[in-house]
Image (cartoon, coloured by chain):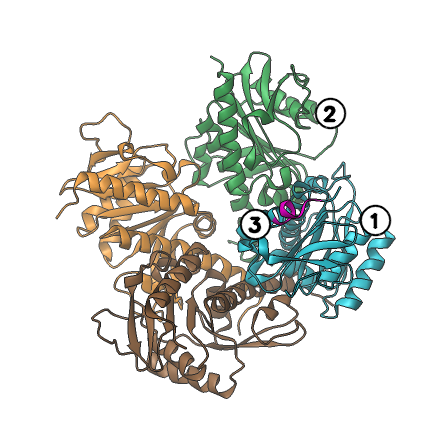
Chain colours: A orange, B brown, C cyan, D green
Amino acid sequence: MWPEETIARNSLVEIGRWVGSRGWCPATSGNLSCRTAEQYFLISVSGKDKGSLQVEDFLSVDFTGKPVNSDKRPSAETLLHAVIYSLHPEARFVVHTHSINGTVLSRHLGHGQIVFRDYELQKAFSGVETHDVELVVPLFANSQNMHTLAEEVRGVLRSDTRVPAFVLAGHGVYTWGKTVAEARRHAEAMEILMECEYQSRLLQALTPRV
Amino acid sequence: MWPEETIARNSLVEIGRWVGSRGWCPATSGNLSCRTAEQYFLISVSGKDKGSLQVEDFLSVDFTGKPVNSDKRPSAETLLHAVIYSLHPEARFVVHTHSINGTVLSRHLGHGQIVFRDYELQKAFSGVETHDVELVVPLFANSQNMHTLAEEVRGVLRSDTRVPAFVLAGHGVYTWGKTVAEARRHAEAMEILMECEYQSRLLQALTPRV
Amino acid sequence: MWPEETIARNSLVEIGRWVGSRGWCPATSGNLSCRTAEQYFLISVSGKDKGSLQVEDFLSVDFTGKPVNSDKRPSAETLLHAVIYSLHPEARFVVHTHSINGTVLSRHLGHGQIVFRDYELQKAFSGVETHDVELVVPLFANSQNMHTLAEEVRGVLRSDTRVPAFVLAGHGVYTWGKTVAEARRHAEAMEILMECEYQSRLLQALTPRV
Amino acid sequence: MWPEETIARNSLVEIGRWVGSRGWCPATSGNLSCRTAEQYFLISVSGKDKGSLQVEDFLSVDFTGKPVNSDKRPSAETLLHAVIYSLHPEARFVVHTHSINGTVLSRHLGHGQIVFRDYELQKAFSGVETHDVELVVPLFANSQNMHTLAEEVRGVLRSDTRVPAFVLAGHGVYTWGKTVAEARRHAEAMEILMECEYQSRLLQALTPRV
């Protein structure tokens, strides 16, 4: 049921190389995790370039964010990963990217939600069968108070477990998946949708459709 | 006359790596096919990353979209490939990309056609000898009903066999070619023209030419 | 004085890989040449992907564009290369790129000239010592009549031999250099300046400086 | 205390490859240095492509910009590196990039300062703990008079040693760090912030927030 730890670490290294190659975690931003037990998950250490993470650059933490048998410092946003795993028991990987388009659009909107509609790519999310529905992604004001932010996220995610992702304003995107492939697909879909939506808003503002 | 199956599969893998490296099939979107017989073609299986397809990730289907000797699931849009092959007997490869610029511009326009003019790159399409003509590409509203959509596409493509490509709104671009080289050239030309046209519309809206 | 032919062919292959990796010659567009004698130069054959050119993908032509001992078909724009070599006897390499930003801005402007000012990168052109001068690049309306276009270009380039490059509207950029390094530097500088100028015009139109 | 010279040269080559791969030093622009002694630092020679620098492409200079035991020509902007090292004794690496977004935004603004706010990425700078403060980066009008420019930069940097970077208009970004990792993180953060701010200004001008 739970991924074996060596496989988990290798999978996280692989996801890290991929987000690094896409430029989605600049300047050591972003973080990655893999749930390895009922009460624990592996998360990337603070302050390392995600594109060149090694298997030893992850530590085990519990759901309060406390390191388990490690003196490494986990990512500042460990509690947000814990919220996701506690509300989505089937999730095994959480990917937090921090791209330019994700930053710019979310910072501009500030808080509330981002609504995607009429994008075929919405179907990249498991359970979405058509472009012809609204894909609603919660957007939270950025905060350095992780306890407060985590509770805010928990409240929204608990109220609708179909929420496929969430965004922190001026900060980045959180997605998750049951497998490496699904986590990557969800992360890529959100990043591309954020870029599409940024470009769409420029075009729509300049040449409005009747 | 028909490509040998091993060569066809290897060619499709090669095209997949190329579209993957360009970022034109994000989050497992897009699909690829090669016609291998009068009534059959190989098409990519559903739900795989196009940039890392292997030779076994294609299955043979007939022109109604039915798998031949395979329990794999073909791409949802198999019927659109069948329409192209039935109307363009010389075509051997169909490439469906799903890029950001293709998505944004086509979603904005909604349906009808996209007209390219005064781009030297129009000459990348076989049979086009000058930039000084209109290159008209049909644009269809996106739909999850493939039978209806396929018939709509068939009607437009049958009415003018010089149509070099078509676009699904908010979804992506379909191109085809007699060889790998021609299919790649047509796919790349359409993607670049879509990006050019997106950027041109921003510039034209902000600093109109007299 | 003249580059040895094997070295010339290898240098052109190298430049081809570089422009290919930058995406500046999409869909087999663009062309490359190297002057190898008083009256001859090697030029890329028509219709090949510039990023994967091989040493045999070049043929020798004279200054009227006629192939020398070859039944290969030279690039359609061979005469424009001949004009450059005839007016710039020190030039050994000509690079014609065909990028998105070069296409969009030049197509928008149509004809006349593109003026760059206050870009440090202007100094990438040999002989330019400061950003604080206008760098004036001629812009020609695109044409499929190479004889007429070549004479038009010749007239403008002859009138001012300090002209560092020229642009065909909706088509692309021509630059040249005495060495591979200089030709690459000039080509890259023009491409980046075109992209800078495109972006600058959007920003200036939206948030004008007083 | 001071980096051993071989290690310093290898580190500079590595940083060069990285900025080259990102396209941040086009057409031989940009420069790199490493302080190797109380009164000396290694700096890249003038006029070479930063992405393919070799260990021999650096020379030692003193704080007046004079080469030490070398007839190579240092980068034109050597004095700006000297200013940084003299005011930031802990700095070991200076990275000057020259990206498109850095060029366009800074040229548009002209001089004064660039203020970043509400970007999580501000925390990439050592000592910045929150997005909820203004990150103020001085912006200087570009100049070819390095002595005047260096004194102007010195005045501003001396007045506030917390300044994390500075920008020359239409030219590029200067950042520094105590280690290769910190210098890269600061350089990347500034480049991404410049791109974010460019895009944010387009979006804000077109769809203002109330």
Q: Are marks 2 and 1 in contact (CB under 8 Å)?
A: no
Q: Is residue D55 above or below residue D190?
A: above
Foreground label between 3 and 2: 2
The quarter of the picture where residue A45 lies is: top left
The percent coordinates of residue D100 (x first, y second) are 60, 45
Residue under label 3: D201
Determine which of the numbered discs, if any, sits on residue D148 in the image.
Answer: 2
- Tell me the kind of residue under disc 3: Arg
Pick whichever, B91 or D138, lies toward us: B91
- Separation of residues labelled 3 and 1 (CA atoms): 40 Å
Magenta portion: prevailing SS class: helix
Foreground label between 2 and 1: 1
Please count the marks in the image: 3
Determine which of the numbered discs, if any, sits on residue C161 in the image.
Answer: 1
Q: Is residue B43 above or below residue B88?
A: above
Can residue C96 be seen from the camera position used here?
no
- Tell me the kind of residue under disc 2: Thr
- Tell me the kind of residue under disc 1: Thr
The chain carrying label 2 is D
Q: Is residue D38 above or below residue A22?
A: above
Q: Magenta segment range?
A: C3-9
The percent coordinates of residue A109 (x first, y second) are 45, 53
- Separation of residues labelled 2 and 1 (CA atoms): 33 Å
